[in-house]
Image (cartoon, coloured by chain):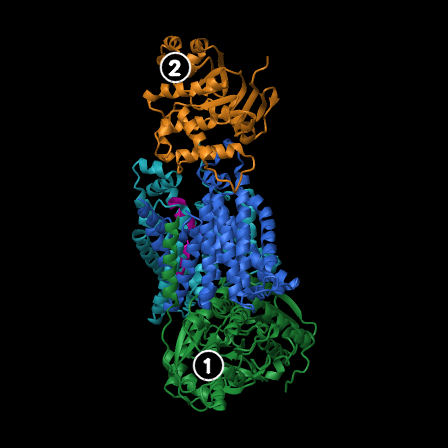
Amino acid sequence: MRNSTLLVLGAGVAVMAAGMVMPGWLTFLLTLALAKGLVVMGLLLLMKAGLVSFGQGLYYCLGAYCVGVAGDYLETQNALFLMLIAVVVCVALAAVIGLLLCRYRDIFFAMFSMAFSMILYGVLVKSSAFGSSDGFNVKPPLLFGWTPTGEPGPLMAYGLAVTAVTVVGIFVWNYLRSPMGYAGEAVRENEIRVEYLGSSVRRIIYIKYLLAAAMAGLGGGITALAAGHIDPEMAYWTTSGEFVFIALMGGTGHVAGPVIGAVLFELIRTYAFQISPYTWQMILGIALLAIILYLPKGVWSLVERFTKEKTS
Amino acid sequence: MITSFVKKSTLAGLLVASAVAQPVLAADEYKLGLVTFLSGGAAGPFGVPAKNAADLVLETLNAGGLPAPYNMKGINGRTIKPVYVDEAGGATKQASELRNLVERQGVDSVVGYISSGDCLAVPAVAEELKTLTVLFDCGTPRVFEDSSYQYVFRTGPTATMDNVAASHYIKEMFPKLDSVSGINQNYSFGHESWADFNGSLNKLIPNVEVTTKQFPKIYAGQYGAEISALMVNSANVIHSSFWGGDMEAFLLQGSARGLFEDQTAVLTTGESAMYRLEGQIPEGTILGGRGPFGIYAPDNALNRWFREAYIARFETAPTYPAYKMVQGIFGLKLATEKAAEKVKGQPTTEDVVSAFENLVYEGPGGTVSMNMGNGHQASMEMVYGRYSHKSGEPSVTDVRRYPAACVNPPEGMSSIEWIEKGMPGAKCN
Amino acid sequence: MKLVIAMLMDGVIYASWLFIIAAGLTLIYGVMRILNMAHGSFYAIGAYSGASLVGFYLAGGYPPWGAYLMLLGAAIVSGALVGILIERGLLRIMYGRDEVVMILVTYAILLILEDVIKLIWGVDAYFAYQPYTLLGRTKMAGISFANYDIALIFVAASICFLLWWGLNRTRQGKLLQAVIHDRDTAAFLGINVTKMFSITFVIGAVLGALAGSLTAPGISVMPGIGVEVIILAFAVVVIGGLGSVGGALMGALIVGLARSAAVHLYPEAELFVIYGVMGLVLAFRPQGLFAIATARKI
Amino acid sequence: MSALLETRSLARNFGAVTAAADIDVSINAGEIVGVIGSNGAGKTTFINMVTGYLQPSSGDILFKGKSIVGKNPRQVMRAGICRSFQVAQLFPELTVLDNVLIAYGLMQHRVLPMFRPLATGNSIKQAENLLQEYGIESYLPEKVMTLPQGVRKLLDIALAMLREPEVLLLDEPTSGVAIDDKFDLMDTVMQAVRKSGAGVLFVEHDMEVIARYSTRLIAFYDGRVLADGPVAEVMDNEKVKELVTGHHLEIDYKREVAHA
């Protein structure tokens, strides 16, 4: 286990170093994909417990707006500080909404969580101080006034994203093996048994919801810093749907699934845009169908199949 | 675990390698990125007319078939090769796609963006990549009021003048005006349009009552309740910045219920529906075209050529997004060629930028002056008229033209501030 | 008085429109446990085929009242065609997957159909306003309403009655109810569940297309109209209780009246009102108003 | 001496339907109380009420002299009353090992750890020992959904016993189990129970099982206690014969008692 943690850390450093030689568009694409990967990792925790949130956009957007608004009001570009604010605010909101949501299951959980994100969308569209539906621009991130290239650029956000994904990835990897992690699967499988083993199903779901909100807020914060612009679209239901899409694409069997899913999703989408600007939606739809049909456990299952063949 | 990582990184490496491979560029080609809506609700009314116009103009330019001063082949003699991108997907997505256009596809410059949100998001990327980016259609004045950019230009006028001119026009047409109502989409463009209209009208005619202001969701399509509310709270004039399908649906549903029989609508984008819904627009409806475009375009050689060629090819008259696209391409072409003349060779992007600043040129919609936003933002005259179908052909009467200096804030002042202060320095004749 | 009548009429008209959209969605969910996002595409396909068929028809100079038949015909033909194609070609091999996976499957279908629509009809708007204006208007308390919209109320009521009659008074309907109640037992009793699925999906698709084609005369038919109605329809069926036709009716009425009240009394709230109502209903009735009971034995 | 678990005039209605009324039952440590009654007699309702899954409409439940009415299943569990289920309540998609590991994990921590792994050398050993005790260690790597009913029932009871309860409520332990296996199953269970000294109440349809294992018998009918006392006495009760067991179903319970 120690070895694998080291390995993940090593991979993180390697990916970070690769950022130095990558073309800018790829760095940017990967930054956004990793940020989405973070959101989907949180979604993965919920999905392991049988809950599908169609409202993670709520925290994704809230995290982004926290970074944008706090950056403006406090006149800081300090990425760590801003991301911390994003996470804290998201967890605080989740602590309230979670109390209500942890009573719901299945499609009702999905729709109720979506309702909350749509309410945020509505509020932001009405807020002309925050630029209404056009949103506003966010200054590029610094680390205590420092950037790798000397001037603010996409590399800084990339570094943040890689670091965040590595740290959160290691956490989630360990989490999924812990009693709390397994409790999610237990809740999905049989709530009655969980209660009769002396654990509170609601509390388990609540904690997972908080963690998922924190990760979504972090992902949103990084997106804001990387893209330099935020708008209420981040809370729209299609954004939340995209996260579920990515989760199924990558597979929920492993913590790497969301990251692979997010990168693959962004790559497919950008090349679909380029190859067929008129019918890119169709390409995306066909890709999704193909994955559901042939790789029901997501793209990660390919990797698993590979390694199993190797070891057996 | 280890093998899984090896496999994973090989896979990722392959993906990256295939993605990095870039197409080879022909030296005499000018690669032009064109970004407009090709899907969703803005594609039909805006994106595709703009794309059609671009197709038409670029082909003619490459053949050298335009009247002077646009008679040089392509852009500065280089054949233009368009690269189209769909504007769908939101501002973050578009920031990402602009990078792809520049870094992966290697475009020389970009003309595009209809959505104001996109116009606010992409300039930062354009600056970072030092790529000349011409915004052609979006309306929010915030682009150059909130920030200043070196590599970004907007050849289309801002939406402020649509609504300020609408106030002027109403003042003239309705001397006894005492009430207005509004129906605008619930998003930035709708909110800003109403605020500009209401603000400027209050300065021009004090004490006008606002009977109701409705903000239905964009793309809602069903306006039954809103129309009833407008009927219950009847006013002299109904202001609406609805566009595309929403505007057309509102017109159809409103006409069928007789909404416009004792109230007059001001449709700031109404010109684009003139030919599509010719029988359905009530007589006397006030139509704007977001500038001197379409039916309001001046009778000059460029306009005659453009209109005829567009109608011949697409079997419909060009609407304002088409005009604005042509205007954007023309500005880029002219600035590039002016810079080339100055440096006597292929100009750098910076050369083109300095030639573009404060450029004054003629397009199919008349004079475009890049005299706002430190020489990066165009201003134009604004025109309003009233719909008439008496001749059996859709046409406009009572046309009033408002000079750019009358309906735009002076350099250095934001639109909101300008309207709040009672539009000081406006030179109306 | 004027205000109250306007509010009620607007609410009921909007509710009728919502119900016609939501009926097919809730029926498909009840029987098949698929929350069908592609329902939005059925709506769009219905609208496009309705609008273009009416256009053809009127261009041919036939009597204008026939346009209503065209709308109906376009919906039945296009809805049935797309419904059969999707059910046979795709959904059939997916049955038994998780509910969430099925939502994503139908989302993929939606994405594909959006572009198929674009390939067939292009991005230009289609109009078929003649049926809308032909019926004239009626004045109530000083406010005019389009007779076409008033007729929509009767159409919605007829659809509601037909569904009720079909489910409760026909043999096939009773079999369908058995499937809704307990799929496994129904299969065990020898009901051909697969056939029931096909029939339901086609009926649902036709209802979706009908909603679109009936809406077409009042709007400008263009890309993206389908996506806009899905979430509305979802909200309606969730409020009413997934899978219940009566629930969809109640949900539509609640949303319709709440929305029209907001528009007339407090327009700022228009965007929130649907989600507010949904939140309120779910907070007190977590399964919606008319939930299908699923008892769990321990 | 007051009983370990005692109910007083316990009642529960579902709308107009009375599922239980006036139930006075007591269980002492070491006792093995059988419960019989036709379907709908209120047996499972009774267990659900005692374990907090259902709240009684009226009446009281005393555990070691203290009322536990109003507590939820978790609290009742922690107090020392555990139960098994008519339909085994397990995690069907997971393996037997994971089921047991999760059970231990959830049971041992009030605040579940997020960083420590669930499966360690020790916890796996512990799980193996438990499964060995119930004779189902060979199923360790199998998914629960693939197991035969009998094994599932055993695993269900094993999980109920994890907390070493003072009162164990078994809801039809042999239902769904192959006839040939029912005594083996009951023997295994009773062995474990006797070791712990817990008081047991078990609902059962099978008179052979009742006769062989219970030290006292309670008959439920229509939500009420029809008879309560030594096995033979209750079995001979005319009302029980008429309403619960039925004359035609008479079996040679005396032989079974002797056998036990």
* Tag 2: amino acid: Gly
Nearest the eye: B276 or B94 = B94
Please, which chain is the residue tagged with disc 1 on?
A: B
How would you rate the neighbour count of disc 2 (Cα within 10 Å): few for under 14, some for 14-19, many for 20 or more?
A: few
Q: Which chain is cyan?
A: C
Instruction: Give the residues drawn in magenta, as a range.
Output: C20-44
**Which numbered disc covers residue D104?**
none
Q: Is residue C237 magenta?
A: no
Give the quarter of the figure containing the C terminus of chain C: top left
Label 2: state its secondary structure. Answer: loop
Q: Is residue C34 magenta?
A: yes
Q: Position of residue C39 (x, y in %)?
A: 40, 55
Q: Which chain is green?
A: B
Q: CA distance from mark 1 to mark 2?
A: 96 Å
Is D201 above or below relative to C247?
Answer: above
Magenta stretch: dominant secondary structure: helix
Residue at numbered disc 2: D246
Residue A162 in view here = yes
How would you rate the neighbour count of disc 1 (Cα within 10 Å): few for under 14, some for 14-19, many for 20 or more?
A: many
* Colour for chain A in the figure: blue
Q: Position of residue D184 (x, y in %)?
A: 36, 20
Q: Position of residue B82 (x, y in %)?
A: 40, 77
Total numbered circles: 2
- Left-right relation of B50 to C285: left
Is A297 above or below relative to B221?
Answer: above
Q: Position of residue B18 (x, y in %)?
A: 36, 65
* Tag 1: amino acid: Ile
Residue at numbered disc 1: B329
